Amino acid sequence: MAQKPIPLTNMQRSSLDELSGGSAIAMNVVSDKLGAVYKRPGLKTSDNLPGSVINASGLTSVHASYGGTVYATGPAYGVSDIYKLASGGVLNLSFDLATRLLGTSRPVLAETEALLVFVAGDDPQKVVLTTDVSSRLGGTPPKATHVVGNRLRLVMNDPTVDKSKLRYSDFATGSVYAGNEIWSF
């Protein structure tokens, strides 16, 4: 029986089967017309990230804010730390239970002009962008697993009361986020 090599190039369709087609995923690469694979043009390392380990147990989320600051959360075992990453090192914004993200779900966050809002299945956590202070989101927000910033409001699911409905905050304007701490029922 004749055997021919199977060309596994980046231009073939992805496949979960190791021997049929290209790799299951190719990130940050481009291929030329001959099939040679190159790193995507313009990719470079960031000077704003520390060279040391942020959390030896790993990270569960990373977010680059509109202002360019990078935030991350530690492993979610019910209580997660929130970090601010900078070229000088890592600032842990969580120093007690009130400043940590609660919940066992994968962290999800939304960014407004004034806040980063993190949820993971328990009480939502906010980080005020001007001060980098972490605390519980005020008012009566749901114990959400998902959050979305929708124009001037925050929208969250409420898995403990009714999984088919969403709750939303009042309007927040500019750097005044008080409206994001007033919630519908």
Image (cartoon, rainbow, N blue to C red):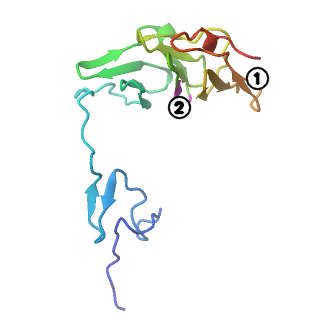
The quarter of the displayed image where residue 68 is located: top left
What residue do we see at 42% from left, 27% from top? 66
Residue 120 horizontal/vertical position (percent):
56, 25
Q: Amino acid at mark 1?
A: Val
The quarter of the displayed image where residue 82 is located: top left
Residue, disc 1: 161
Query: Horizontally, is 42 left or right of 14 in the view?
Result: left
Residue 107 lies in the magenta-colored region = yes
Sequence-wise, the earlier of marks 2 and 1 is 2
Residue 170 lies in the magenta-colored region = no
Which is more toward the observer, 4 or 113?
Answer: 113
Circle 1 sits in a helix, a strand or a loop, which is it? loop
Which is more toward the observer, 78 or 116?
Answer: 116
Circle 2 sits in a helix, a strand or a loop, which is it? loop
What residue do we see at 60% from left, 28% from top? 148
Q: Quadrant of the C terminus?
A: top right
Magenta residues span 105-110
Residue, disc 2: 106
Q: Is residue 163 above or below residue 93?
A: below
Q: Amino acid at mark 2?
A: Arg
Q: Quadrant of the N terminus?
A: bottom left
Residue 74 horizontal/vertical position (percent):
41, 25
Mark 2 Cα-neighbour bin, 10 Å: few <14, some 14–19, many ≥20: some
Residue 182 horizontal/vertical position (percent):
67, 11
Q: Are marks 2 and 1 in contact (CB under 8 Å)?
A: no
Mark 1 Cα-neighbour bin, 10 Å: few <14, some 14–19, many ≥20: few
Residue 141, labelled with which disc? Answer: none
Whole-angstrom CA distance, mark 2 to mark 1, is 20 Å
The quarter of the displayed image where residue 132 is located: top left
Residue 140 horizontal/vertical position (percent):
68, 11
What residue do we see at 27% from left, 46% from top? 42
